[in-house]
Image (tube, helix red, strand yellow):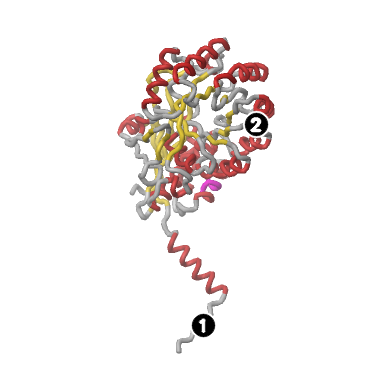
Amino acid sequence: MVTTTPLSTSDTAGHAAQRADAATGDRISWVRLSSVLLPLATPVSDAKVLTGRQRPMTEVAFLFAEIATEEGHQGIGFSYSKRAGGPGQFAHASQIADQLLDEDPSDIGRIWTKLVWAGASVGRSGLATQAVAAFDVALWDLKAKRAGLPLAKLLGAHRDSVRCYNTSGGFLHTPTEEVLANATASLEAGIGGLKIKVGHPDSKRDLERVRAVREHVGDDVPLMVDANQQWDRPTARRMGRALEPFDLVWIEEPLDAYDAQGHAALAAALDTPVATGEMLASVAEHWELIRQGAADVIQPDAPRIGGITQFLKLAALAEHQQLQLAPHFAMEIHLHLAAAYPIEPWVEHFDWLEPLFNERLETGAGRMHIPARPGLGITLSDQARAWTQAEHEVGKRP
């Protein structure tokens, strides 16, 4: 007969701790930050330029974070800034990068909090958390790679592809004839929907452009418009009514991003759904939109709100209210996050970032497909290295 002695509670806890230590013994040993300046082939203008609030955009500044562990696992993430702020993101990230060393890369939530508090005197939104976002995305990429899964599968995908729409072909600086040609090219490339910019000081020109695109592509192609926050409340109501006949999927950012009350009133008054959220820089700011019923379609940007950890919190809030989801920009990240959202979402197609990576995302039949590659499925190209303005490393290079 074999006799066994029951383990005490303390023994059981000790064995569990030993198993946890064995499973998560890996530690972050190296971090590299890169400040990369992506030039745009043509200066880009939307309504903010035509109303004099901003200058045309000529470049996008990226903050890349590469993280490696003692056991050889690696991850890559990025944040970005348009027009201004890129050097500030890089400087902030450089000051807190050493906080990652010797941390367990699996403890992503705890690391996010640690990094935010390392720079808490400048706030828990905006530039500070956008710097943290690059690290956070890299840690999620690393975790999925270690599991041998695309990030969407690690998070729990609801689908293998996501509806996608093109934005980069419909900016206000682009002549209408070229917008129509771009629309044709996008549809032929397997992109399902089209978004064009509005918000011109002469509203008749907006309506003419929308009418031209709708007539060009037909009634069955999903079409969106984006006013980039340039209308006041009366103008938004008038334009919203005038745009109703074009059967739009949504009207984006009709009002100032922080005017939750105005967006809520507009959403209640129009049949066309109202979309907004891309310019907000925290979950708390998005919650105000959700709380007031200010958006039918929520458009968070993971790098802008602090990374994937924060995006997942926001997605849970949005799902609870049965909101549509259409993340802004950065399709290399947002494809995976949209695929894991229970309600059928959209993802925004921008080809601007393609020179930065060795891989390409595939589109077809109106959808963008999740790559089979583990993690985000991206690696930095030689061109990205050539566009690097500054680097900062901590720890031991693998």
Residue at position x 37%, y 41% from top?
Answer: 371
The x and y percentages for residue 112 are 53, 46
Task: Say which residue label 1 marks.
Answer: 5
Camera-nearest residue between 386 and 227: 227
Magenta part, dominant SS: helix
Judged by depth in the image, the label closer to the viewer, 2 or 1, is: 2
Q: Secondary structure at mark 1?
A: loop
For mark 2, what is the residue? 294
Q: Residue furthest bottom?
A: 1
Residue ID at (50%, 17%): 55
x and y, in percent, of residue 365 in the image:
40, 33
Element assignment for label 2: loop
Image vertical order of residue 233 relative to residue 18, above or below: above
Dividing the picture into quarters, in which one does residue 61 lie? Answer: top left
Figure quadrant of the N terminus: bottom left
Magenta-colored stretch includes residue 124: no
Horizontal side of 142 relative to 282 (left or right) equals left
Residue 101, image x, y percentages: 44, 50
Q: Nearer the viewer, residue 59 or 299?
A: 299
Kind of residue at disc 1:
Thr
Q: Is residue 112 magenta?
A: yes
Question: For the residue carrying disc 2, how many other residues have a C-alpha within 10 Å: few (<14), some (14-19), or many (20+)?
Answer: many
- Does label 2 or label 1 sit earlier along the sequence? 1
Figure label count: 2
Residue 385 visible at all: yes
Q: Nearer the viewer, residue 32 or 220?
A: 220
At label 2, the amino acid type is: Ala
Residue 121 can be seen in this image: no
Q: Residue 49 placed where, x, y %? A: 52, 16
* Magenta-drawn segment: 111-115
